[in-house]
Image (tube, grey):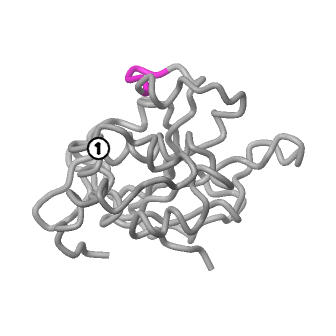
Amino acid sequence: MMSSLNSITDLRSVGFGQSVPEYSLCLLHWFATTVDFDNNNIILLTFDPNRGDYGSHHYRNDEQLLDPLPRGYRYYTIGNIYQDASLELPDYVVESDIEESNRARIIIRVRGRNAVRTIDQVYITQHYEPYEARGTEYDPQHTYRVTTCLLRVLRKFSLHLNNINSLALRNRVHDSQLSEIRNIPDCLL
């Protein structure tokens, strides 16, 4: 069963910045600050994954990593830093000293093909390690569902502290650093 990430504590528990690379967290932070939320806590798509924005493309789920799609939905993967795109990922996502920094991906489940498209599921994942010779398959051991609540927390953290790296570097986020995000109302899960 796939784990859900609902809080900073959950990120720590799965080893973000350790077994889950720091660049995955940078990608997740970017996503949280790029999408919009309506008054009902629905995630609104702010870019066009069909156009390849931010290294995105249709994800067929061939390896059955995720649940089968209901009618009218599509999966997209986001985060290929080497894919030509009309909208590019910011430097803090793509610039890394780590040679394997293109392994991280976000997968979204999108409903609708009209002017207003909504996202009802978000996942953070990564490709297998190169030595595992699995090609472009995603590693189910490092795939997590990300809740709307965590996305909202990451947005708030970013807006007030402007230092997402402190979340990833050996889990050195202190309670005093998180004091500004403690008053977030319960999110719809």
Work out which quarter of the rendered image holds the N terminus and state it. bottom right
Residue at point 71% right, 33% down?
100
Magenta extent: 85-89
| For residue 84, above or below residue 169 | above
Say which residue label 1 marks. Answer: 158
Tally of marks: 1
Give the residue furthest to the bottom.
Answer: 1
Between 140 and 153, the residue placed more toward the observer is 153
Between 42 and 96, the residue placed more toward the observer is 96
Q: In the drawing, does residue 9 fall left or right of residue 42?
A: right
Q: Position of residue 15 (x, y in %)?
A: 61, 60
Residue at point 49% right, 72% down?
4
- Is residue 30 one of those drawn in magenta? no
Between 104 and 9, the residue placed more toward the observer is 9
Work out which quarter of the rendered image holds the C terminus and state it. bottom left
| For residue 143, above or below residue 96 | below
Q: Main secondary structure of the magenta part?
A: loop
For mark 1, does the 10 Å Cα neighbourhood hold few (<14), some (14 to 19), or many (20 or more) residues?
A: some
Q: Position of residue 117 (x, y in %)?
A: 27, 51
Which image quarter: residue 175? bottom left
Q: In the drawing, does residue 51 fall left or right of residue 99?
A: left
- Mark 1: secondary structure: helix
- Is residue 88 one of those drawn in magenta? yes
Q: Position of residue 174 (x, y in %)?
A: 39, 58
| For residue 6, above or below residue 47 | below
Q: Position of residue 25 (x, y in %)?
A: 50, 47
Between 67 and 91, the residue placed more toward the observer is 91
Residue type pointed to by label 1: Ser
Residue at point 52% right, 63% down?
12
